[in-house]
């Protein structure tokens, strides 16, 4: 008997504007495996859950929505201790990152002063939480990307790794290479998509020593957060990143030079020209 296919020839795909960028969900599970969770209808329902969770979390954390809990806290209409538990969890993580980075990472905007803005942690964290819905529904081979930050599970095809393009922060729509990973997360902080939007919390000035910094590792929440903190740290960022054993980094400098961390993660990134 011929072995049943485990992967679709072409994935089912869903895209959706969210968090000021675009979410993209790709599911590769083949219904030929006989699993009901991999039918087109079941995959569509699972992707609906991912989108719904991203929308829900944006409504809680967006600083661009006046009715979000973060905006209500900033306006004095909601006490921090009365916010949802997940708001406190995120702010706890941001506080840890601020101390670990010596203040380079900060979940408050310099203007207006002291206004909460945990965006440097929320996007990766929210994406990882939402993507978990796919695993909860029994799907094994998928990836979810929000604004270019990716979490991947399983494989895109038998015997193939995931390949994630590394954007050239100096040239729109160009790449400097491709990162190959077995699974896990890839997150990039830099100027390619939104310009100079990351601030060094120590000086309240834009971080501009590096052009971009990409982090790979098992968790998108922490890959994204560490990429933001390391980028804000500037020249010291790659050295700082090496203290996190499960994560590895690739930095693109203003002159196009590429450097990597000396630490070796369990599944180190491979930069393919």
Image (cartoon, rainbow, N blue to C red):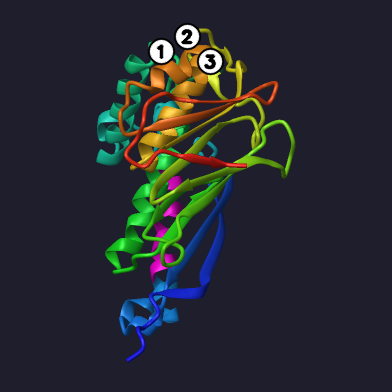
Q: In terms of depth relative to the viewer, which is nearer, 262 or 221?
A: 262
In the displayed orientation, state which residue is furthest to the top. 203
Q: In terms of depth relative to the viewer, which is nearer, 165 or 124?
A: 165
* Residue at which label 2 appears: 202
Q: Is residue 5 above or below residue 130?
A: below
Main SS of the magenta part reads: helix
User: Can you tell which of label 1 and label 3 is closer to the viewer?
Assistant: 3
Answer with left or right where residue 110 lies relative to residue 1.
right
Q: In terms of depth relative to the viewer, which is nearer, 193 or 266?
A: 266
Q: Residue at x 48, y 15 (%)?
A: 233
Q: Give the alpha-carbon distance from disc 2 to disc 3, as whole Å.
A: 11 Å
Q: Position of residue 227 (x, y in %)?
A: 46, 29
Q: Give the alpha-carbon distance from disc 1 to disc 2, as whole Å.
A: 5 Å
Residue 218 visible in the displayed image:
yes
Query: Which class describes the residues within 10 Å of circle 2: few (<14), some (14-19), or many (20+)?
Result: some
Q: Is residue 2 above or below residue 12?
A: below
Q: Position of residue 42 (x, y in %)?
A: 38, 77
User: Can you tell which of label 2 and label 3 is closer to the viewer?
Assistant: 3
Q: Position of residue 90 (x, y in %)?
A: 32, 34
Are the residues tagged 1 and 2 within 8 Å (C-beta)?
Answer: yes
Q: Which residues are magenta?
A: 46-60
Q: Quadrant of the C terminus?
A: top right
Mark 2 residue element: loop
Residue 222 within the magenta-colored segment of the rendering: no
Residue 56 within the magenta-colored segment of the rendering: yes
Query: Which class describes the residues within 10 Å of circle 1: few (<14), some (14-19), or many (20+)?
Result: some
Answer with left or right where residue 120 lies relative to residue 85.
right
* Residue at which label 1 appears: 103
Mark 1 residue element: loop
Q: Residue at x 51, y 19 (%)?
A: 232
* Residue at which label 3 appears: 234
Q: In terms of depth relative to the viewer, which is nearer, 95 or 81?
A: 95
């Amino acid at each position: 008997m011929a072995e049943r296919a485990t992967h679709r020839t072409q994935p089912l795909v869903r895209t959706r504007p969210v968090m000021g960028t675009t979410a993209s969900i790709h599911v590769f599970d083949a219904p030929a495996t006989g699993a009901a969770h991999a039918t087109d209808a079941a995959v569509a329902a699972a992707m609906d859950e991912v989108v719904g969770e991203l929308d829900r979390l944006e409504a809680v954390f967006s600083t661009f929505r006046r009715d979000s809990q973060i905006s209500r806290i900033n306006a004095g209409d909601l006490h921090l201790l009365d916010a949802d538990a997940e708001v406190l969890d995120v702010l706890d993580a941001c506080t840890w990152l601020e101390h670990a980075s010596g203040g380079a990472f900060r979940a408050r905007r310099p203007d207006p002063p002291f206004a909460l803005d945990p965006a440097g942690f929320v996007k990766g964290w929210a994406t990882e939480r939402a993507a978990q819905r796919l695993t909860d529904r029994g799907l094994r081979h998928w990836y979810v990307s929000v604004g270019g930050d990716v979490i991947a599970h399983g494989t895109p095809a038998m015997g193939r790794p995931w390949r994630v393009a590394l954007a050239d922060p100096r040239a729109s729509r160009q790449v400097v290479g491709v990162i190959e990973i077995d699974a896990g997360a890839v997150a990039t902080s830099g100027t390619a998509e939104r310009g100079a939007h990351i601030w060094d919390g120590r000086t309240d000035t834009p971080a501009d020593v590096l052009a971009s910094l990409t982090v790979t590792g098992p968790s998108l929440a922490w890959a994204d957060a560490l990429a933001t903190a390391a980028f804000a740290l500037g020249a010291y960022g790659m050295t700082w990143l090496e203290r996190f054993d499960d994560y590895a980094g690739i930095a693109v400098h203003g002159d196009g030079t590429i450097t990597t961390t000396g630490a070796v993660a369990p599944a180190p990134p491979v930069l393919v020209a």
